[in-house]
Amino acid sequence: MCAAPADSRPIHGWETSSLRLEQAIEGQFTPVREPAPHLNLRGRRIPVRCTVMCVSLSNLPGSYVGDAVLGEIEEELHAHQPDHTELGSDRVWAVFNLTDRDYDAPFNMAARVHSLTRILTRTLEQNGFSGVQASIGLAYGSGTRVAVGTDEVTFTGPVVEEARRLADAGGLHSGLDGGSSVRVSRSLNQMLSPRNRALLQYRPTFSMFHGNPVNHAMETWLSVHLP
């Protein structure tokens, strides 16, 4: 695979995510992560109902390569204009459905993130790294929008904790590994289209619906360019 010149960086788009990650691996650019803002959770608080996505990543490479993986996922989310995104040390958050009721949109976005993670994993493996593993929790419910600065907000509350629980559920002998990249709360599942609900199975032990939905265009690209 050809790399771009050292002084250039391809425009954003999932088709060039693999190329940008290779540039980071080769030291052609270093992703810059802004320091996390100091969160003053005593700011103005507004009750909301929304869908929260938590993308939890394990086996992230250290230093700037891991930051590049997180950055690609956050950029893909940004491209589809969620209501909010937030970056952590090993996870990416997104908030949807504050002002609209298209509950399939975050589910379809989760499928895109799942496929993008597979592209990034294949790129890492072809460059001598272990692949990352992603679990994506999706929950709908009540939360709180908190102003934490002049232009900064964050979200707290039960829906955030539910998305985190779903993303972090499982373990070596849970039966979730490898077959549950996307985990959906019962409250969100009942609002999905029949087509999307058919892609999931219910797991009573974890009180979740789970499955491996993918984006077909991205999977086709993966099979052609990173076989």
Image (cartoon, helix red, strand yellow):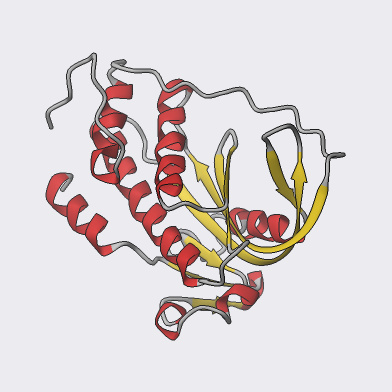
Q: Nearer the viewer, residue 219 or 132?
A: 219
Q: Nearer the viewer, residue 48 or 53?
A: 48
Q: Is residue 178 among what the camera can see?
A: no
- Residue at 29% over, 30% down: 20
Residue found at the very far bottom of the displayed protein: 194
Q: Give the quarter of the image for residue 64.
A: top left
Rendering coords of residue 204 (x, y %): 63, 77
Q: Tell me if 227 is positioned left or right of 153 in this view.
A: left
Q: Is residue 223 above or below residue 182?
A: above
Rendering coords of residue 152 (x, y %): 68, 36
Q: Nearer the viewer, residue 148 or 227?
A: 148
Rendering coords of residue 112 (x, y %): 37, 57
Q: Is residue 165 above or below residue 84?
A: below
Q: Nearer the viewer, residue 226 or 148?
A: 148
Q: Is residue 146 above or below residue 69?
A: below
Q: How many numbered discs?
A: 0
- Residue at 58% over, 33% down: 89
Q: Is residue 203 above or below residue 64?
A: below
- Residue at 34% over, 31% down: 129
Q: Tell me if 58 is positioned left or right of 108 in this view.
A: right
For the N terminus, give its image quadrant: top left
- Residue at 39% over, 18% down: 30
Q: Is residue 14 among what the camera can see?
A: yes
Rendering coords of residue 145 (x, y %): 74, 51
